[in-house]
Amino acid sequence: MAIMERGNSQEARGQPQQTPDDDAGGGPPGRDVLKDPRIKRWLVRGAVAVVLCLVLGLVFTLRIGITVAVLAVIADVVRLSRKDSTVPAWQKSSAAERRTEKQLRSLEKGGYRVLHARAVPRDDEGVSDGRIDHLVIGPSGVYAIDSEKWDKRLPVRTLSHRKLFHGPFNKKERLDEARWEADQASKIIAGRVGFEVPVQASVAIYGPSIPWKVMRVRDVDVYAGNRARGYLRRRPKILTETDVQRIYQAAQKALPPKYPDAE
């Protein structure tokens, strides 16, 4: 989805960027390995650990030096794991999506299945090639959740459940886009499973304070991003485990990953 407040569409969406080396035909194997950010991170961790071990070993004892070095490495691993994502394209540029993804992981044990960053194919008129940030299929139904990071300095308000404003900005187009994507997903999945599959559109907003729990505006559920998990948990069960699995498999095939290397 392209929206004004997200900035440049490709860059803001974490679209993989081509670099000059992509077509250079490779190079020495060692150089390619060293370009891997994970290798670099572990080299830095190792260097820091050695320095800590030596310094503290001289000041105190070798045992204390080793202990502190190990704890420092563990702390860094834990810190970075909180930023990790199962969708590689999100790892650098989409904090809102990562935060929602983290909430949704805990729902898996409750029978929920989630697909991230799914492309919505163009319709018959060739309109839009949108993206659903999180397609959630579970006992309480099917949901298309889009995660948004908005300026926290601007207030969010609604008018008669038909208009949503972020400061002076009318978010009508954003809501209509989210609803369109959910409707398209519903039709596409239903065509595969042979029965109606309603998909509820929703927008999880991070940044500004949201003065309500869940508000339906233009048929789209709007709520604070940190309520995404609760939003799904509190709904009545309407699908069986078999239904969930069948819809999940159909959606997996019918809605391709927006980024082919995301799976």
Image: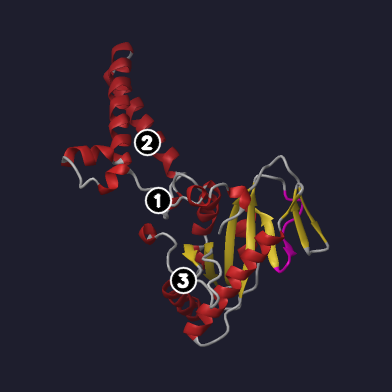
- Secondary structure that dominates the magenta span: loop
In the rendered structure, which segment of residues is drawn in magenta? 210-219
Question: Residue lying furthest bottom in this view?
Answer: 194
**Which is more N-terminal, label 2 or label 1?**
1
- The residue that mark 3 highlights is 255
Instruction: Please give left or right for residue 140 compared with residue 116 in the image.
Output: right
**Quarter-wise, where is residue 181 in the image?**
bottom right
Tell me, yes or no, whether the highlighted magenta stretch contains residue 218.
Answer: yes
Residue 21 placement: quadrant: top left
Task: From the viewer's side, name the closer residue of 58 and 207.
Answer: 207
Q: Is residue 258 magenta?
A: no
Q: Amino acid at mark 1?
A: Pro
Q: CA distance from mark 1 to mark 2?
A: 30 Å
Q: Position of residue 200 (x, y in %)?
A: 63, 70
**For this view, does 4 lie left or right of residue 86?**
right
User: Which residue is outermost to the top?
Assistant: 59
The residue singled out by tag 2 in the image is 74
Q: Secondary structure at mark 3?
A: loop
Q: Which residue sits at x=63%, y=64%?
A: 177
Residue type at mark 2 is Ile
In the rendered image, is residue 203 in sight? yes
Q: Secondary structure at mark 2?
A: helix
Tell which circle, 3 or 1, labels the residue nearer the N-terminal end.
Answer: 1
Residue 216 placed where, x, y %?
A: 73, 65
Tell me the CA gap for discs 3 and 2.
38 Å
Tell me if residue 240 can be seen.
Answer: no
Q: Which residue is mark 1?
A: 16
Q: Depth-wise, is mark 3 or mark 1 nearer the camera?
A: 1
Residue type of the residue flagged with mark 3: Leu
